[in-house]
Amino acid sequence: MSNGISIIEVRDLTKKFGHFTAVNNICFSIAKGEILGFLGPNGAGKTTTIKMINGLLKITSGQVLIKGMDAEKNRREIKKIVGYMSQKFSLYPLLNSLENVEFFGGISGLNKSRIREKQKEIEASVSLPILKQKVADIPPGIKQKVALFVCLMTDPEIIFLDEPTSGVDPEVRRSFWSEIYRLKKEGKTILVSTHNLDEVEYADRMLIIHQGNIILEGEPDALLKKHNKDSIETLFKDAILDSEGTVETKT
Ligand code: ADP
Ligand code: MG
C-alpha cells in the first residue's frame, strides 16, 4: 500500500456476468499523484474493473470511492474530474481527428472558442493533412495520440488509460510514457493498464490481476527484491503459477 492520501478506494469490488465472476472481490487504492500500473493477461479483468470504477458497467457488489465520493451515486461530479481512454481508443472512425476533438469537446461542455483552441493545440503536434483524414485511416500511433489528447481535453485530475499502448510501436510507446510522466509532474493521478510486462517498471506501483483476483501489489523494484526475482517476467509468471495453486476456484 502507498503512504500517500488515497484519491481512489476500491473496496471488495466484484463483477459477475451471469455465473461467471470476472472481477472477484478486489481491493486497492490509488494515492494522489501516483502512476499505478495495472498488469494482467488478456481476460484478467482489467477493463471490467476500469469500467466499473468509471460507472460504465454496473457493480455487482462492493464500492468505489473517488475523492471520498461513492462512484455510483456521484457520477456527474466524478465525470468532471476523471478522464478515461478506452481500450479501443473510442474515437469516431468516420470523423477526422479535428471533428473528434470538436465532438468530444462539445459533449464535455467546452465552448466553441475553447474547442478551437484545442484544435490549434493538436495542430501543433500532428500535421494538418493527417488531422483531416478519417480516423479509420490514420496510423495507430497517431490515433493513440489523438485519443489521449481527447481524454485530457477537460484537464482531468484522475486519468484512466486502458491498454493505451497496445498495437503501437516501441517509439510511440516511449513518447507515450514521457507524456505520462509530464502528467504526473502536473500532479495528476494515473491508472494505466497493460499486458506488456516491460511497461510496468515505469509505474510507481503495480497491481497484477489474474482471473479477476489481485495476486500481487507493490513497487516494481521492491517486489523484485522481496520475491528474489531478477525480472518482472519471472515475477509475473511465478505469481500466476502460485495463484493458480492457492486462489479459490470461481463459480
Ligand atoms: P482484460 O481487460 O483484463 O483483458 P476483461 O475485463 O475485458 O479483461 O474481461 C474479463 C473477463 O470477463 C473475460 O473472461 C471476459 O471474457 C469476460 N467478460 C467481459 N465482458 C463481458 C460481458 N459483457 N459478458 C460476459 N463476459 C464478459
Ligand atoms: Mg481489456
Image (tube, rainbow, N blue to C red):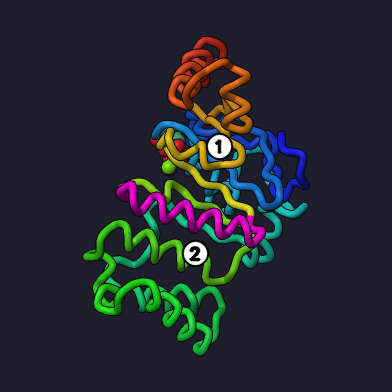
> In this orientation, which residue lies closer to the viewer: 115 or 50?
115
Q: CA distance from mark 1 to mark 2?
A: 25 Å
Q: Residues within 10 Å of mark 1 (few under 14, many from 20)?
A: many
The span shown in magenta is 168-188
> Which residue corresponds to the image point at 53% horizontal and 84% vertical from the top-left?
114
> In this orientation, which residue lies closer to the viewer: 156 or 43?
156
Is 175 within the magenta? yes
Q: Which residue appears farthest toward the bottom when viewing the image? A: 113
> In this orientation, which residue lies closer to the viewer: 234 or 92?
234
Quadrant containing ligand 1 reads top left
Three-letter code for the amino acid on which mark 1 is drawn: Lys
Magenta stretch, main secondary structure class: helix
Image coordinates for residue 178, horizontal then vertical, percent: 48, 55
Residue 15: assigned label: 1
> Which residue corresponds to the image point at 34% horizontal and 72% vertical from the top-left?
126
Q: Is residue 77 above or below residue 122?
A: above
Q: Is residue 242 above or below residue 41?
A: above
Image coordinates for residue 163, horizontal then vertical, percent: 43, 46
Q: Secondary structure at mark 1?
A: strand
Image coordinates for residue 111, horizontal then vertical, percent: 54, 86
Which residue position holds label 2?
A: 151
Query: Horizontally, is 82 left or right of 4 in the view?
Result: left
Is 63 within the magenta? no
Find out if the beta carbon at label 1 lies less than 8 Å from the nearest ligand 1 atom.
Answer: yes
Image coordinates for residue 187, horizontal then vertical, percent: 66, 58
Frontmost of labels 1 and 2 is 2
